[in-house]
Amino acid sequence: MSQVHRVRSTIGASATLAMLLASPALADDWGTLKGRFKFGGAVPTAAALKADKDVEVCGKEKLLNEELVVGADGGIANVVIFVRDKDVKVHPDAAAAKDPVLMDNKNCRFEPHVAFVQIGQPLTLKNSDSVGHNSNIGTIKNPPSNSLIAAGAESNVTFKAEEAIPAQVTCNIHPWMKGWVLVRPNPYGAVSSADGSFEIKNLPAGDIELQLWHEKAGYIGEISVKGKSEKIAKGRKKIKVAAGDNDLGEMVLDANLFKK
């Protein structure tokens, strides 16, 4: 090989290496975010709900008010957290969500209480009960939908626009039934589990802005981490995501936030 060819080969190899290192799809460009929400006060007792329709079915269930669900260890369920940034870079393995998200009318309540779905991803509204239900979704940017679902049947809804906050889901037949659906344009959202924990995988490394919301508190305006209080305007929290694992730790939400 001539000296000119060797120089050209070296330059070409260097350019290829530089392109690979700069590629956004490299594993070290992505991070996982986790944390836990905890109630700052004595654990409240959920109030019982009275079933006054289809009592022969719904009256058999131990129905509780799910506006605020706090575990024995103080973990807060159903806190919504998602990325607010527009046109955020999405990991190639999570770009398209094709599998339906299930929200079931089961035991005369919605399961899950809060569902997370992406634009274009089917939301399957199922009825596992032996009585009819309807799932009335009060979206703002999407046309509202009201699916009447017979016992044992199901219906699918697909959304074309994102929603700024979760949309309420109600059953007009059984007025105590209430749930929520969060519609976002990307997979970067989560709903805290029974112990208050959450995880969002494959976030792009760098600066992002999170949105924190809860049905009883609305936008989360304040959190406390390791005894240090932090005010959050309209529930918006900016963080820097590093490659790999990112732990926001235990975030305590004062009981006064839920007294609306």
Image (cartoon, grey):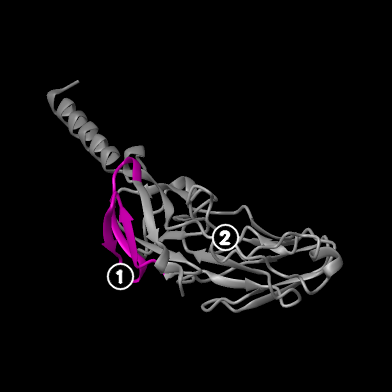
**Residue 131 in the image: above or below residue 191:** below
Q: Main secondary structure of the magenta part?
A: strand
Residue beneath the point at 16% across and 22% down: 2
Query: Residue beneath label 1, please?
Result: 233
Name the outermost residue toward the top: 1
Q: Which residues are magenta?
A: 219-247
- Quadrant in which the N terminus is drawn: top left
Name the mark nearer the viewer: 2 or 1. 2
Q: In the rendered image, which residue does mark 2 sit on?
A: 45
Q: Amino acid at mark 1?
A: Ala
Circle 1 crowding by C-alpha within 10 Å: few under 14, some 14–19, many from 20: few
Foreground: 41 or 131? 41
Task: Examine the structure image and report whether residue 101 is included in the region drawn in magenta.
Answer: no
Q: Residue 29, image x and y in percent?
A: 32, 43
Q: Quadrant of residue 51?
A: bottom right
Say the numbered circle drawn on residue 75: none
Residue 260 versus residue 182 in the image, above or below: below
| Residue located at (48% from left, 59% from top) | 79
Q: Earlier in the sequence, mark 2 or mark 1?
A: 2
From the viewer's perspective, is 131 left or right of 121?
right
Q: Using the rendered view, name the quadrant where residue 57 is placed.
A: bottom right
Disc 2, SS: loop
> Residue 145: where, in percent of width, then height?
65, 76
Taking the image as shown, residue 62 lies to the left or right of residue 201, namely right
Percent coordinates x, y for residue 210 in the rendering: 36, 60
